[in-house]
Image: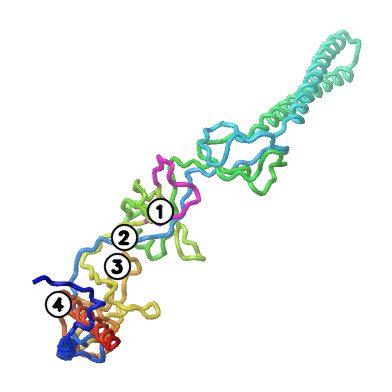
Amino acid sequence: MKKTIMSFSLSWKMIPVAVLVAGTAMLASCGNNGGGLPQSNEFPVATVATTTADLEDSYPAVIKGKQDIEIRPKIAGFITKLCVDEGSVVRAGQVLFVIDDVQYKAALNQAEASYASAKSALATSELTYKNKQQLFKDNIIGEYDLQTAANSLATAKASLAQAHAAVLSARDNLRYCQVTSPSNGVVGNIPYRVGSLVSSSIATPLTTVSNISEMYVYFSLTEKQLLEMTRAGGKKMADAFPQVKLKLVDGSIYAHPGKVNTVSGVIDQATGSVSVRADFANPDHLLKSGGTGSIIIPRKTEGAIIIPQSATTEVQDKVFVYIVGKDNKVKYTEIKVDPQNDGNNYLVTEGLKVGDRYVTAGLTKLINEMEIKPVTQAEYEKSIADAEKLGSIQGNYKEMKKAFSGKK
């Protein structure tokens, strides 16, 4: 006999009333309370134990180049040429800016002319002095005339030295028209362009050249942490640090590990912290001066009590758990936790001891001194799955009942 299968929406009239009656009886037998899920006092409970915890402490950090040099002009003038652009990699001695040199060339020419004149005047003074010496020996002139010639010679020598210094200064000023990089590095922001008037007194530098082959990453420790590190590391506090990692702003971990090399010996009175510097190699120039991130310092703790954060509640920066007593009654208890955590678990420092039992889920349904039935996590999850299945059956039953009523 051929069977015809009809869609559910077209076959309501074919559903026997007995089906709905049976569904009603089934839901009633499951303990339905007003259409909701069945109520239970079963809660998952875990027992406190200790473990060896590999933790990581994270500290906000600022990234600086090994050398961040502000480039400022030594002379005043208009910029006539930009030889690099922002982000360019430059070498020591490479020209970055060119400043108008017309007046400085003229100044050099004038200084060289003055030097030539002073040189000639010195030659004349030397001849005059030699002649005066001979006349003095022949008793033709007196000592006064000889000393006058000697003074003129000394003045001529001083004038020549002054003229020579003026030439060197003018030559330097002309050379300063080409602003060069003092080191290898990367060019930063360039606020001045061609035509800008600049001088040695400008507030903002022409640019900054950062040597980023190696990066200095600065972070801070509290006075208490510094004391702990001092005790661990002895005279050289940097020896107390293991290799550190750098978390970048996108959440990724920088490929090259770093080493803490310097710890400031002075505590900032305003913040109560001390500055620490970790050095990182930067062969790919991924790190940029002025960037930010987080220094991650690994830390191993023996005999640690670790509990999931989902087993706790937080009220006004205080952390609480529900401890289960011998009578299976819960007690709302405050605990102390390490401020550094991985976002999933807490390291408990106070409030829990080995052997204590605590509730791990369903905390919103608990009240202080409530008696519960402790179950394992697996039993609790099975109970939730069964309740969700029952809820699905209830929902289907309501839809069937509503649809059946509308088709009468």
Please identify, in this view, whether the residue under mark 2 or under mark 1 is nearer the observer: 1
**Measured along the vertical axis of the image, is residue 133 above or below residue 318?**
above
Would you name the residue on which mark 1 appears? 248
- In the picture, measured across the screen, residue 194 lies left or right of residue 295, that is right
Residue 18's image quarter?
bottom left
Callout 4, which amino acid?
A: Glu
Q: Earlier in the sequence, mark 2 or mark 1?
A: 2
Would you name the residue on which mark 2 appears? 56
Q: Earlier in the sequence, mark 3 or mark 4?
A: 3
Quadrant (top left/top right/bottom left/bottom right) for the C terminus? bottom left
Q: Which mark is residue 379?
A: 4
Label 2 residue SS: strand
Callout 2, which amino acid?
A: Glu
* Gap in angstroms between the C-alphas marked 3 and 4: 23 Å
Q: Which mark is residue 404?
A: none
* Image point (64%, 41%), residue name: 72
Instruction: Choose between 408 and 251: the one closer to the eye.
Output: 408
In this orientation, does residue 152 appear?
A: yes
Residue 255 in percent (x, y) is at 34, 47
Cβ–Cβ under 8 Å for marks 3 and 2:
no
* Image point (39%, 49%), residue name: 261
